[in-house]
Amino acid sequence: MKAENNGFLVVASKDYRYYAWGVNLLEQIKDYYPEAKTCFVVEERFCDGREEVADHVVYCDDHYRAKLWGMSQSPFDKTFYIDADMECLHEDIATVFDELGDNDMVFNILEEKNHDIFVESHWPGGTFVLCGAVCLYTKEMLPFMKDWFELYDKQMNDEWWPTDENGDWDQETHPRRLKHWDQFTLWWLVNKEEKYKDLKIGEFKENDRWNYWSLQHRKEPMPDDVILYHRSFVADKEVYQS
């Protein structure tokens, strides 16, 4: 019987710190789940041998959101993407692929209770719900990841934006301040693109366990069973670096 080809994917680009954090994350995953298959998408200039902790190494460029391109390069049938600035703290990381069910993708949800710690949540045309910090997906979603990267690149380079009934950029419904967010591109693809209208998108059953934001513990005690801890604030990242 052929073993399932499931694996974890981490991307490090632009800043060397993401390489160091990514190595740490991959090592932690292996500590809790020795059989885990892993892929590290990384800029070659960062590599010092520690990238070999991963089973697969794919070289990327220094694009601001190389993570989206990297997600499209997964060698696995089922992939769990994790932001590099996260820590794996629990053995239940081994159960993540059970979360997929019959969905095409599974995301962490930006819950209303935490909207006060996000830079941006609501705008006239919509609300961010899906968080791109972690994503579980099937190999059939690789073209989606490619579209996500390419549309975001156009968005950032002022080559694309939603238009109004006159064909002009709709800056009233969708303010251009959102252009830096790849989450806006994600929101657009899953809510507005006809070819993706039938996607089955799920959410993690225990949302906080799979992406516990570092700012949350300033509001409430951090649970003991958090699986992935996300250093989502600059000050926390500076402490992490030291």
Image: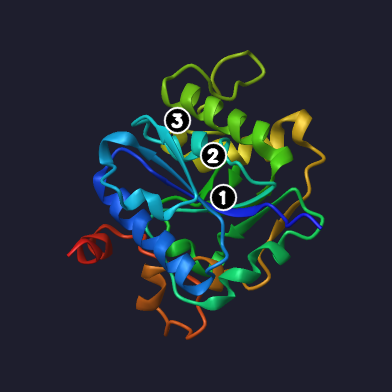
State how far apart marks 2 and 1 are (Cα): 7 Å
User: Which mark lies nearer to you, 3 or 2?
Assistant: 2
Q: Which residue is mark 2?
A: 184
- Who comes first in sequence, dot 3 or dot 2? 3
Could you tell me residue 62's position as x and y percent?
A: 33, 31
Q: Which residue is mark 1?
A: 128
State how far apart marks 3 and 2 are (Cα): 11 Å
Q: Quadrant of the N terminus?
A: bottom right
Contact between marks 2 and 1 (CB within 8 A): the answer is: yes
Could you tell me residue 111's position as x and y percent?
A: 57, 64
Amino acid type, callout 2: Phe
Q: Quadrant of residue 13?
A: top left
From the viewer's side, name the closer residue of 166 and 189: 189
Q: Does residue 172 appear left or right of residue 191 in this picture?
A: left
Amino acid type, callout 3: Arg
Amino acid type, callout 1: Phe
User: Which mark lies nearer to you, 3 or 1?
Assistant: 1
Taking the view exactly as shown, the residue that stands out farthest to the left is 242
Q: Quadrant of residue 4?
A: bottom right
The residue depicted at 64 percent of the width and 65 percent of the height is 96
